[in-house]
Image: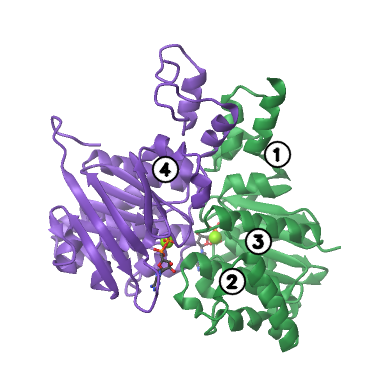
C-alpha cells in the first residue's frame, strides 16, 4: 500500500453502484460502495454469479459502455467518472484481464510477440519503447520462450499468461484481473501474484477476482465479499476470512484459517484467525510476535 | 474391468520437437490425477488416450481397443473426454440439446438421451439452465455443460481436463462428489488438474508429468511426500500438507480434516 506522509489518494471510488443486464430481472450489482487507495491490492470473492465479473467490467467502463442495461450510482477511476467519459480515455487508465483468455486474443496476430505489441501499436508508442515494453512483459510473465509461437497453438495456461502480458504491457495505472490464474499451474499462479505484488509496489492499483483464497490472503490488502450482487464486507483478509457466516455466502476461508478456527487458535488482540501459513507459525512460534500478545 | 494400457508412446506436433516421450503406464480402477506444469503435455496426452491424436511410436489400448486401429467415433462409447476449453465442445443452441448431442451420437434413443442429460445436469447443479443458450452462460457454467454432456453418454472411462477451472467452492464440492460416485460405480476416472487441494481430497493415485515424461506415479499421499521433487517440477504441496509440515508433523496429511482430527486426538 502506498501512502505519502499519511495522505492517501483514492484511486477508485464506487458509490451506490447498481447494474442490471438487459432482459434480466435481477440486479447483477446491487448497491456496491467502496474506495481503493493508490497502490492497494483488492481481492473480490464470492460464489459464481455473485457479481465479480460484472464489477470488473464496471471498473473498466465496459459496463455501461459496451453492455446496455440499467445503471445507477457512480464509479470514479482516478477522478474520472466512468459513465460520462469514453472507453478510449478509460482504457489509458484501467486495463482488464478477461476471465477467458480467448476473449483477449486479437486473432489477427501470428506470434505471441505481435499479440502483446498490438495494444501498444494502437496507442502509438515509439518502436523503441514498444520493444522495451513487450520484452518487459514477456519477462514478467515468464513466457519469453514462447514469444514466436502462434497464440492459438498454446496450451490454456500459456494463453492465460499471454493475456496478462498484453494488458500489463500497456502499463495501466489500474489493473483489473478477472480470475487470471484459473488455468495456471501452482507455480505460475504464484508468479502471477508476485507480479501483482511488484506492480502494486510500483504504485499500480490492483483489483483481482479470484477463487484461490490462500493466495488472496497472502497478497491482498483488503477483500471485497460479494453475494447476489450485494456487498457483504470490505475489510482485511483476516477480518473477512474470520467471519463465522462466510459459508453462507458460498465462500470458504484459506485452509489455514479453517484449521485455526477448529483448534480455537485466535489472535487475542485483533480477535481474528490466521489466514496464511506464516501467521499460523507466528501464532505458534516465538514470544515477540503480535499473535501472542494478549 | 476398465483399463487403459499405454505402451511406450511418443508424440510430437512438429518434427523434432517431442511433446511426449516414452510414456508407459497402466490405468486400472483407481481414480487418477494427472498433474504438471503448463505445457508439460497433459492435454496432448489425454487427447492421445481419447484417440484424437495417434502416437508416433508405441500403442494405446482403451478397454483392449488399440487407438491406432479404431476411429474416434468407435472409441467414443468407451471413453469420454471433457475438453479443457468448453468452447471446443459446444455446438448447439440450447443447453439440453447440447448435452443430448453426445448420447444420441453414440446410439442412445432420444428419450434415453433426454433422461440421461437431465440427470447429468441435475447432478452438476445446472438443470435450471437447460433451455438457455450455452453461449449466454458464464465460462464456468459452460464448463459444467461440457461435463454434463460427457456424463450423459455414460462411458465406462471418463477423462476431465482441468474440470475445476473457474469453479467456486460449491462447484468444486459437486465435482468431487460426482467423481467419487463415478469411481464407486466402477467408472475409470482420470483428471488433469492444477488444484492440489482438490487432488489430495479426491484422487487415489497421482501421476506427475514434466516435459512430456512421467516423473512420479503412485498413491496420492506418497506422491505428496516427495516435497523436493514436487517443487522441482514447479508444483506445490496441497495446503493441508504444507500446514502439517509447518506444525512439525512427520506424516503427510492430505486434508484439513485429517489434521484437525489428528491434533484433536492428541490434545
Ligand atoms: N452478459 C450477461 N447477460 C445477462 N446476465 C448476465 C451477463 N453476465 C452476467 N450476468 C448475470 O449477472 C449476475 C452476476 O454475474 P457475474 O458478474 O458473471 O458473476 P461472477 O463473476 O461472480 O460469477 C449473474 O446473475 C449472471 O447470470
Ligand atoms: N495444436 C498444437 N500445435 C502445436 N503445438 C501444440 C499444440 N497444442 C499444444 N502444443 C504444444 O505442446 C506442448 C504441450 O501442450 P499441452 O499438451 O497443451 O500441455 P498442458 O496441457 O500440460 O499444459 C506445449 O509446448 C504446447 O505449446
Ligand atoms: Mg466471473
Ligand atoms: Mg492442458
Tag of residue B10: 3
x then y, percent, for residue B81? 65, 69
Vertical relation: B151 (above or below) B234 = below
Chain B tint in image: green
Residue for badge 1? B221
Question: Are the residues flagged by discs 4 and 2 in contact, CB closer than 8 Å?
Answer: no
User: Residue A87 at x, y = what percent?
Assistant: 19, 68
Going from the N terminus, do you reach mark 3 or mark 2 first?
Answer: 3
Q: Mark 3 and mark 1 in contact? Answer it, CB < 8 Å.
A: no
Mark 2 neighbour class, 10 Å CA radius: few under 14, some 14 to 19, many 20 or more: many
Judging by the rendered image, the residue that carries numbered circle 4 is A216
According to the rendering, which colour does chain A have?
Answer: purple
| Chain letter for mark 2 | B
Q: Is residue B135 above or below residue A172?
A: below
Instruction: State the CA–CA distance, disc 3 to disc 2.
Output: 29 Å
Q: Nearer the viewer, mark 3 or mark 1?
A: 1
Tell me the chain of label 1.
Answer: B
Q: Is residue B231 left or right of residue B220?
A: left
Mark 1, Cα crowd under 10 Å, few <14 / some 14-19 / many 20+, is some
Query: What residue is disc 2 on?
Result: B146
In the rendered view, tell whether residue A202 sits above or below residue B120.
Answer: above
Q: Residue at x 64, y 83 (%)?
A: B101
Query: Image quadrant for the C terminus of chain B?
Result: top right
Q: Tag 2 or tag 1, which sits nearer the N-term?
A: 2
Tell which tag, 3 or 2, sits nearer the viewer.
Answer: 2
Quarter assignment of residue A55:
bottom left
Q: Are marks 3 and 2 on the same chain?
A: yes
Amino acid at each position: 500500500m502506498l501512502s505519502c506522509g499519511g495522505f492517501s489518494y483514492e484511486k477508485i471510488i464506487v458509490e451506490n453502484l447498481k447494474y442490471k443486464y438487459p432482459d434480466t430481472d435481477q440486479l447483477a450489482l446491487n448497491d456496491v460502495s467502496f474506495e481503493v487507495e493508490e497502490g492497494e491490492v483488492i481481492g473480490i470473492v464470492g460464489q459464481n454469479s455473485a457479481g465479480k465479473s460484472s464489477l470488473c467490467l464496471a471498473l473498466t467502463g465496459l459496463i455501461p459502455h459496451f453492455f446496455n442495461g440499467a445503471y445507477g450510482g457512480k464509479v470514479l477511476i482516478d477522478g474520472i467518472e466512468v459513465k460520462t467519459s469514453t472507453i478510449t480515455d478509460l482504457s489509458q487508465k484501467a486495463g482488464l484481464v478477461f476471465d477467458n483468455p480467448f476473449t483477449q486474443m486479437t486473432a489477427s496476430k501470428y506470434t505471441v510477440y505481435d499479440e502483446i505489441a498490438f495494444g501498444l501499436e494502437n496507442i502509438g508508442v515509439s518502436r523503441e519503447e514498444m520493444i522495451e515494453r513487450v520484452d518487459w512483459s514477456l519477462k514478467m510473465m515468464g513466457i519469453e520462450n514462447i514469444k514466436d509461437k502462434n497464440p492459438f497453438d498454446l496450451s490454456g495456461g500459456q494463453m492465460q499468461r499471454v493475456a496478462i502480458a498484453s494488458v500489463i504491457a500497456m502499463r495501466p495505472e489500474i489493473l483489473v484481473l478477472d480470475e487470471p490464474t484459473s488455468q495456471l499451474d501452482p507455480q505460475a499462479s504464484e508468479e502471477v501474484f508476485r507480479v501483482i505484488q511488484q506492480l502494486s509496489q510500483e504504485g499500480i492499483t490492483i483489483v483481482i477476482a479470484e477463487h484461490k483464497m490462500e493466495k488472496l490472503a497472502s497478497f491482498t490488502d483488503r477483500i471485497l465479499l460479494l453475494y447476489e450482487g450485494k456487498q457483504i464486507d470490505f475489510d482485511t483478509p483476516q477480518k473477512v476470512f474470520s467471519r463465522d457466516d462466510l459459508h453462507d455466502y458460498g465462500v470458504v476461508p484459506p485452509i489455514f484459517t479453517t484449521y485455526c478456527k477448529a483448534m480455537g487458535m485466535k489472535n487475542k488482540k485483533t480477535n481474528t484467525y490466521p489466514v496464511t501459513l506464516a501467521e499460523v507459525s507466528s501464532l505458534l512460534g516465538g514470544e515477540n510476535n503480535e499473535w501472542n500478545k494478549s | 474391468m476398465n483399463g487403459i494400457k499405454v505402451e511406450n508412446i511418443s508424440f510430437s506436433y512438429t518434427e523434432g520437437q517431442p511433446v511426449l516421450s516414452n510414456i508407459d503406464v497402466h490405468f486400472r480402477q483407481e481414480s487418477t490425477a494427472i498433474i504438471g506444469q503448463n505445457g508439460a503435455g497433459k492435454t496432448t496426452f489425454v487427447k492421445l488416450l481419447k484417440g484424437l491424436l495417434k502416437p508416433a511410436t508405441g500403442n494405446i489400448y482403451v478397454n483392449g481397443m488399440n487407438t491406432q486401429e479404431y476411429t474416434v467415433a468407435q472409441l467414443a462409447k468407451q471413453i469420454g473426454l471433457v475438453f479443457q476449453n468448453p468452447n471446443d465442445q459446444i455446438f448447439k443452441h440450447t443447453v439440453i440439446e447440447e448435452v443430448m448431442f453426445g448420447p444420441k451420437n453414440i446410439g442412445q434413443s432420444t428419450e434415453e438421451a433426454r433422461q440421461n442429460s437431465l440427470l447429468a445436469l441435475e447432478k452438476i447443479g445446472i438443470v435450471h439452465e437447460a433451455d438457455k443458450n450455452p453461449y449466454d452462460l458464464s465460462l464456468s457454467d459452460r464448463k459444467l455443460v461440457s461435463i454434463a454432456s460427457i456424463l450423459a453418454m455414460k462411458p465406462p472411462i471418463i477423462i476431465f481436463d482441468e474440470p475445476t477451472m473457474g469453479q467456486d467452492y460449491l462447484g468444486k464440492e459437486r465435482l468431487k462428489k460426482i467423481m467419487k460416485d463415478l469411481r464407486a460405480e466402477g467408472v475409470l476416472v482420470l483428471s488433469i488438474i492444477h488444484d492440489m487441494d482438490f487432488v489430495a481430497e479426491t484422487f487415489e493415485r497421482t501421476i506427475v508429468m514434466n516435459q512430456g515424461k512421467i516423473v512420479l506415479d503412485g498413491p496420492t499421499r506418497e506422491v505428496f511426500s516427495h516435497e523436493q521433487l514436487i517443487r522441482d517440477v514447479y508444483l506445490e504441496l496441497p495446503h493441508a500438507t504444507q500446514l502439517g509440515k509447518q506444525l512439525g508433523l512427520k506424516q503427510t496429511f492430505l486434508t484439513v480434516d485429517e489434521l484437525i482430527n489428528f491434533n484433536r486426538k492428541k490434545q
